[in-house]
Amino acid sequence: MRRLSIGRPGRASRLAVCLTAAGLTAALLTGSGNATASPEPKRTTSEFTANDGVTYTATNNLLPSAGGRGREWMLTWAGSADPAKPDFLAVIDATRGSRTYGEVVNTVTLGPGLSNEAHHMQYVWHKGDRLFAGGLLSDTVFVFDTKALPALKLAGVNSTVDTPCGTAPDAFQVLRDGTAYATYLGGPDVPGPCTYTNGEVRLGNGAAGSPGEIVRMDENGQTISEIPAALAEGEDPEQCANVPKLEKATCANPHGIMVSEERNIMVASDFVEARHFLSPKLPDEARLARQTVRVWDITNRDDPELLSVSKMPDGPRAAREDEKMWHESRVVMEPALPHKKHHKGAFASSMLGGAIFYAPDVTVPDPKWREVFDDTTAYRKAGADRDVTGAGDAGSWLMVSPDDRYLFHTVMGQSTPYGAPLDKTTGMVYVLDIQKLLAAGDNPKCDIDSIDEALPGRQGAGLPGGDLRHADPRHHRRRPALGRDGQLPAAARRSLQGDRAHRPPRHLELLHRRLLQR
């Protein structure tokens, strides 16, 4: 679930970013519990007939409190707790001093489909931009016109037939001309060869498999070009597993995306080969948990050139982990780019590894990544128990401030349904001062390569410890103790990985059925 802050109509352009906010949204939607009569909403519906022949709808349910000028709004793209009810965009009053501050003033419900798995919107929004919202499991992108906020209009839909070489749309970056790049995490609709817009061909193992792709869309969400993310020659099969196995191995499962139009650079981070992890009967496979970042030259916006595929290094904590899934390099969820043109580097964060990496120059053929911060340090700064580390902490959103002074990072923490000992989440937001790191140019000294630098209370060079400006925790959990054989107890292992003897959530079952039907 993502939320997006949007500036007041009529004001100068301002930058806003997405943050994970499941708890806040749930509280806003359920209300305080006081039994008061709700005013009748004003309902207006817009529709769009997509290339799959389906007419999609978006219905505003505007409350009277949504009126008035000079307002600020926060949008949350969410799925209903009741799978029989539609997904929606909630428009929340974010105007300080307003009597309805923090209240939902419009619920924009989508039809006709259900359980899209509302996922990301774009990370950065400027006044006038359209809103791109992805349905991860429905393989659908919804585009909204925001000119009449707090009302929204459905401006376009990119459906399954529009991207035959990719599935599972994930993240978006909107360009100044209103077009957008989107990451598609999963492979082609059907196994076999798929031809991209530029005529190149890659072999894929099917929906939610590999390789994923990048899609350029127009302002209405229509496909301009499908762009290959996989190297034509393939990648290291020892590092990049595929199930079923591909003739040319690939780790191309792009998730997060960032673009610098000034530098003509696009960076995307690889996540996992998703289909394997959706089955409750298959064991975890660490080689499906990606460690790579891809960089393109986007001088030709419709046909970017893939410049490099580079691997995050394992940090010093890796030697102490029993499971490769918890190594610092595993599941690279998000990249981040500095904004000033003379900064050539990039950051990346790992979801299961709990670390932040930096490459001083991603324009070279072989970017050199180094670990520059371990989430463990943030936990110590926030007062967490000493056995809490960054391993498996679900690090997510990553963004450089517009002035290139700070790096913001959100950690989601483990989900409560896993049970003890992960029934307490480890969510937090922390901020790093990156000014010295960027000023060091191509030769920064910051590099966490020893356990003394990674563990709390022992600071290395550059970022660790001393440059942590703020850490805002929610809850902390203890990592389970190892058994006498040095392995995790069976109950703890099930908790950490999710008990695969139990049925997966319904939305994962829906995708699994869709994949079997393809």
Image (cartoon, rainbow, N blue to C red):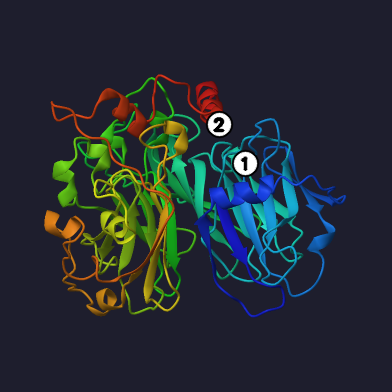
Name the side, left or right, on which 321 lies relative to 11. left
Q: Residue at x 55, y 36 (%)?
A: 137
Amino acid at dot 2: His
Res 245 seen here:
no
Residue 189 or 393: which is nearer the viewer? 393
Q: Residue at x 17, y 73 (%)?
A: 443
Q: Which is more N-terminal, label 2 or label 1?
A: 1
**For the residues marked 1 and 2, what is the alpha-carbon distance in whole angstroms?**
10 Å
Q: Which secondary structure, mark 2?
A: helix
Residue 435 or 133: which is nearer the viewer? 435
Q: Is residue 423 above or below residue 70?
A: above
Q: Which secondary structure, mark 1?
A: loop
Q: Is residue 423 above or below residue 60?
A: above
Counting from the top left corner in percent of width and height, residue 25 is at: 61, 50
Residue at the spot of label 1: 79
Q: Residues within 10 Å of mark 2 (few under 14, many from 20)?
A: some
In the picture, the disc for residue 188 is none
Counting from the top left corner in percent of width and height, residue 501 is at: 40, 19
Q: Is residue 48 above or below residue 277?
A: below
Counting from the top left corner in percent of width and height, residue 160 is at: 59, 38
Amino acid at dot 1: Gly
Residue at the spot of label 2: 507
Q: Residue at x 31, y 42 (%)?
A: 478
Counting from the top left corner in percent of width and height, residue 355 is at: 28, 54
Res 163 seen here:
yes
